[in-house]
Image (tube, rainbow, N blue to C red):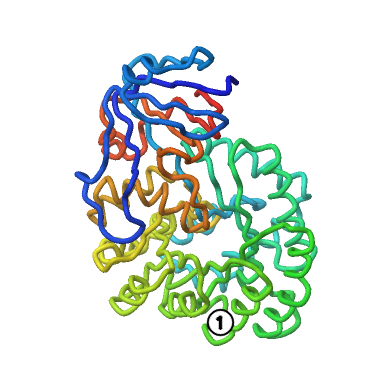
């Protein structure tokens, strides 16, 4: 790869430059450069301008990468909440839900998260790694170049470390950047001898020190819900994890409220789900530095309400959108489709949807160097074969990208 590349012309380049982290956005705030190109060097963006201007000022050693046909260039996507590391599937759960059983009823009958834990424990690290790589390749073809991946289907020292090692090993072979999160506080495993408080103490004393020692994850997550952990015991757990040096995120307000309050109190970077959030929680999130993470794939998989993204944005919150790709509640794993459908039901502008899967999602991972096409940002870009960026959301994910750049390296599909 040449040190410098000039790529274009694109019919439109939608940069997302200078848009705010928090609050509502209108489509007229989007900057669309027409018949434009992008100049990159060593994987970073040097300039975005009209193609004619860039060519006129091109260095002799700059490689020209000519784009043929109608193409729209966007910042590549960030999927900031996934569970890509797992064994087996839960198609039976899906059928039971559609037959009228609730999420909690299925869990109490032996399905749900515990079912996936039992299946995942049977997989070797290599088998888990292979599954991650297959799913990650699908996400790359969707234009996703940064992925958060959680553990949480191990729930004991041996299996949680196996998951996180598999994530780390897979990341070494992936095109994408991977942010690993330890979700050992997913549920209390049924084979743990002790109550929920004792299990969280076990995670703090046995699992997290090893995660830290092996540098397997920089983030800790917890599920606050009836079938998982209460507010009262989760807050001190998260505070202790933060004192150990971990960033914090929280599964919050999925079926009942309370989790977002804990997330804010713990200084979490994001509170994820929020389908049950009320006006009270919306106002708290808007007045905090915690990013609200909508997971429309879970709403579609469970048949429940969507995150109140419109109200959150209007209140002034930062709203990111992620897939929650997992074998149970969100098996689709198609971020763009889910985000577009969320936009339809929550009346979000294209700018709000696009921000939610790019720079606002990056901020939820504490990443400030991606999600926009701007000077100094890494050259993570995605190109769609269409003549107007609006078509990408209008077709709800049915227009697939045919070119993806990760750190300036091209992947064609």
- Answer few, some or many: residues within 10 Å of disc 1's Cα (few below 14, many 20 plus, some between 14 and 19): many
| Residue at x 41%, y 54% (from the top left corner) | 360
User: Which x, y percent locates residue 286?
Assistant: 33, 70
User: Which x, y percent locates residue 66?
Assistant: 42, 14
- Give the total of numbered labels: 1
Quarter of the image for residue 54 reads top left
Query: Foreground residue, 315 or 60?
Result: 60
Query: Foreground residue, 167 or 186?
Result: 167
In the depicted structure, whether residue 336 falls above or below residue 366: above
Going by the image, does 319 lie left or right of 212? left
| Residue at x 37%, y 24% (from the top left corner) | 37
| Residue at x 41%, y 77% (from the top left corner) | 256
| Residue at x 52%, y 69% (from the top left corner) | 250
User: Which x, y percent locates residue 144?
Assistant: 49, 40
User: Which x, y percent locates residue 146?
Assistant: 54, 45
Going by the image, does 252 lie left or right of 204? left
Query: Foreground residue, 360 or 187?
Result: 360
In the depicted structure, whether residue 328 falls above or below residue 139: below
Q: Circle 1 sits in a helix, a strand or a loop, which is it?
A: helix
Residue furthest out toward the left: 28
Quarter of the image for residue 234 reads bottom right
Q: To which residue does mark 1 refer?
A: 235
In the depicted structure, whether residue 254 falls above or below residue 303: below
């Amino acid at each position: 790869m040449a040190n410098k590349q000039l790529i274009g012309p694109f019919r439109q380049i939608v940069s997302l430059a200078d848009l705010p982290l928090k609050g509502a956005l209108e489509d007229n705030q989007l900057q669309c450069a027409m018949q434009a190109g992008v100049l990159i060097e060593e994987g970073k963006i040097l300039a975005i301008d009209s193609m004619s201007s860039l060519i006129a000022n091109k260095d002799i050693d700059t490689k020209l990468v000519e784009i043929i046909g109608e193409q729209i260039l966007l910042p590549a996507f960030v999927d900031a909440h996934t569970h890509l590391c797992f064994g087996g599937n839960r198609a039976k759960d899906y059928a039971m839900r559609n037959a009228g059983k609730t999420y909690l009823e299925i869990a109490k009958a032996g399905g749900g998260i515990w079912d996936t834990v039992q299946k995942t424990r049977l997989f070797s690290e290599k088998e888990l790694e292979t599954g991650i790589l297959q799913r990650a390749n699908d996400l790359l073809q969707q234009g996703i170049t940064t992925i958060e991946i959680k553990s949480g289907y191990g729930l004991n020292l041996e299996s949680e470390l196996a998951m996180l090692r598999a994530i780390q090993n897979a990341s070494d072979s992936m095109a994408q950047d991977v942010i690993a999160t330890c979700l050992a506080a997913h549920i209390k495993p049924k084979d743990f001898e002790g109550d929920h408080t004792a299990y969280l103490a076990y995670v703090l004393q046995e699992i997290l020190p090893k995660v830290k020692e092996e540098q397997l994850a920089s983030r800790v997550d917890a599920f606050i819900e009836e079938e998982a952990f209460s507010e009262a015991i989760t807050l001190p757990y998260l505070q202790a994890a933060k004192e150990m040096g971990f960033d914090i995120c929280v599964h919050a307000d999925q079926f009942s409220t309370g989790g977002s309050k804990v997330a804010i109190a713990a200084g979490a970077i994001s509170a994820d789900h929020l389908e049950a959030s009320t006006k009270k929680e919306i106002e708290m999130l808007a007045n905090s530095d915690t990013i609200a993470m909508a997971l429309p794939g879970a709403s579609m998989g469970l048949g429940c309400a969507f995150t109140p993204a419109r109200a959150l944005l209007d209140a002034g919150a930062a709203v990111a959108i992620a897939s929650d790709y997992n074998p149970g509640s969100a098996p689709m794993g198609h971020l763009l489709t889910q985000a577009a459908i969320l936009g339809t039901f929550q009346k979000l502008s294209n700018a709000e949807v696009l921000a939610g899967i790019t720079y606002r999602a990056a901020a939820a991972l504490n990443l400030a160097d991606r999600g926009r096409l701007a000077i100094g940002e890494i050259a993570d870009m995605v190109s769609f074969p269409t003549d107007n960026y609006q078509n990408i959301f209008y077709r709800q994910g049915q227009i697939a990208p045919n070119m993806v750049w990760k750190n300036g390296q091209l992947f064609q599909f």
